């Protein structure tokens, strides 16, 4: 069964290459749930990935998508669907989250994540983690089992221990492709600035693979989550948009759920995820118009790039990105998984 889904997804991916899918009609009245995931903006340039690499991304995205979809199909919650899909992507070295996190300027992996439930605007976020295998699960624990919204660094990891959340040695996150990218960036940055502490610039090479999911469940609850290793060569202690509620993640019932990826500093300054939902809520904009306005107009004008996935209260979907590509997957109106990269 899984193989058939993977094949269908692969065929879907191969049959459509250009961006973006502008029309995502709301799901029919019968389909009472919706699910979409992303695997980050900043995809390697078209044609530079081998068919095997593309297949590996397609299969992992499909696996994550189907795990969340299955939960929703069985009447499960949007939060469970979001967490389940993100955990699968965090466990894969292909994505810049969990196992495949990129490196900081001083050669460490510092992980950030957040999750939000649209039903009561509950939210949980974690940042600057070095030992938590699945940061999205810790973010959810902060939301559900603490009086707080955000916990960082050592304190967050102490809380993870209390919650029996799996901790791993820091070296678990070491992967050669990410290490090689850091070495390349160190060379480039040192050539630009002798101090080696030049400003962080977004290039397809230094950030790709942040993961996120948005879901609407059969009870009408929206949820969103995002998990990342941030940007290669980020300074120690730098926190991006992914764990910032309202910037990288936002969900509000009857309005929308958003997960973002891109150059985080800009997403924070524009409160991208919240701004999209505010345009839907206050201005009555359609979801696609709202995501386009924030990502293609406001974000671009400020000099940032990246993308978002979003779902509204009717299960309508929107995807917008200003980067060359964005890994993304969803279940279409006929119930088939769809995966796209460019
Ligand atoms: N938004 C993430 C950050 O700035 C990076 C990404 O999405 O690729 O930390």
Image (cartoon, grey):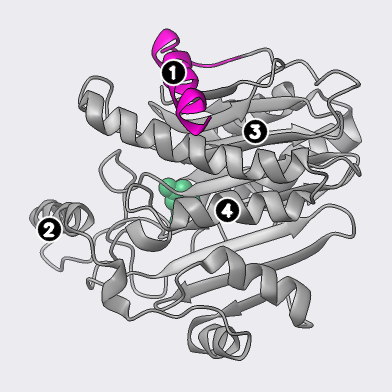
Tell me the crowding category of disc 3: few under 14, some 14 to 19, or many 20 or more residues within 10 angstroms, Cα based.
many
Q: Which is nearer the eye, 144 or 229? A: 144
Q: Which is nearer the eye, 321 or 331? A: 331
Give the mark nearest the N terminus, 3 or 2.
2
Give the mark nearest the N terminus, 2 or 1.
1
Q: Is residue 147 above or below residue 220?
A: below
Camera-nearest label, 4 or 2: 4
Is mark 3 in CB contact (under 8 Å) with mark 2?
no
Please tell me which residue is depicted at 45% across the width and 70% down the height of the picture: 133
Give the mark nearest the N terminus, 4 or 3.
4
3D distance between C-alphas at marks 3 and 2:
34 Å
User: Residue 226: which numbered mark, if any?
Assistant: 4
Question: Pointer 1: what residue?
Answer: 13
Task: Check disc 4 and report its element: helix, strand or loop.
Answer: strand
3D distance between C-alphas at marks 4 and 3:
18 Å
Residue 66's x, y, as percent?
A: 59, 38
3D distance between C-alphas at marks 1 and 3:
26 Å
Camera-nearest label, 2 or 1: 1
Residue 273's x, y, as percent?
A: 68, 45
Q: Which is nearer the eye, 146 or 82? A: 82
Camera-nearest label, 1 or 4: 1
- Mark 4 CB lies closer than 8 A to ligand 1: yes
Q: Which is nearer the eye, 189 or 330? A: 330
Is mark 4 in CB contact (under 8 Å) with mark 2?
no
Magenta region: which residues? 1-21
Question: Pointer 3: what residue?
Answer: 294
Task: Check disc 1 and report its element: helix, strand or loop.
Answer: helix
User: Residue 183: which numbered mark, if any?
Assistant: 2
Principal SS element in the magenta part? Answer: helix
Is mark 1 in CB contact (under 8 Å) with mark 3?
no
């Amino acid at each position: 069964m899984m193989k058939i889904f993977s094949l269908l997804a692969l065929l879907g991916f191969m049959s459509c290459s250009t961006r973006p899918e502008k029309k995502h009609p709301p799901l029919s009245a019968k389909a009472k749930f919706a699910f979409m995931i992303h695997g980050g903006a900043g995809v390697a340039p078209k044609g530079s990935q081998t068919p095997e690499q593309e297949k590996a991304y397609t299969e992992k995205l499909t696996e994550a998508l189907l795990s969340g979809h299955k939960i929703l199909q069985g009447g499960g919650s949007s939060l469970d669907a979001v967490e389940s899909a993100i955990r699968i992507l965090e466990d894969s070295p292909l994505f810049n989250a969990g196992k495949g996190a990129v490196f900081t300027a001083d050669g460490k992996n510092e992980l950030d994540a957040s999750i939000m439930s649209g039903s009561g605007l509950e939210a949980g976020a974690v940042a600057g983690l070095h030992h938590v295998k699945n940061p999205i699960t810790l973010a959810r624990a902060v939301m559900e089992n603490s009086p707080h919204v955000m916990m960082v660094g050592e304190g967050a990891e102490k809380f993870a221990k209390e919650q029996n959340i799996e901790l791993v040695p820091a070296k678990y996150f070491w992967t050669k492709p990410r290490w090689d990218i850091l070495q390349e960036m160190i060379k480039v940055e040192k050539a630009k600035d002798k101090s080696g502490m030049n400003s962080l610039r977004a290039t397809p090479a230094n950030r790709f693979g942040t993961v996120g999911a948005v879901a609407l469940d059969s009870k009408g609850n929206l949820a969103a989550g995002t998990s990342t290793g941030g940007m290669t060569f980020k300074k120690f202690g730098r926190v991006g948009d992914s764990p910032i509620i309202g910037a990288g993640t936002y969900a509000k019932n009857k309005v929308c759920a958003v997960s973002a990826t891109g150059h985080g500093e800009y997403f924070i300054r524009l409160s991208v995820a919240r701004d999209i939902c505010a345009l839907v809520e206050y201005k009555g904009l359609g979801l696609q118009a709202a995501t386009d306005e924030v990502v293609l107009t406001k974000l671009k004008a400020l000099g940032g790039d990246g993308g978002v996935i979003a779902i509204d209260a009717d299960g309508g979907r929107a995807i917008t990105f200003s980067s060359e590509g964005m890994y993304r997957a969803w279940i279409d109106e006929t119930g088939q998984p769809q995966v796209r990269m460019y």
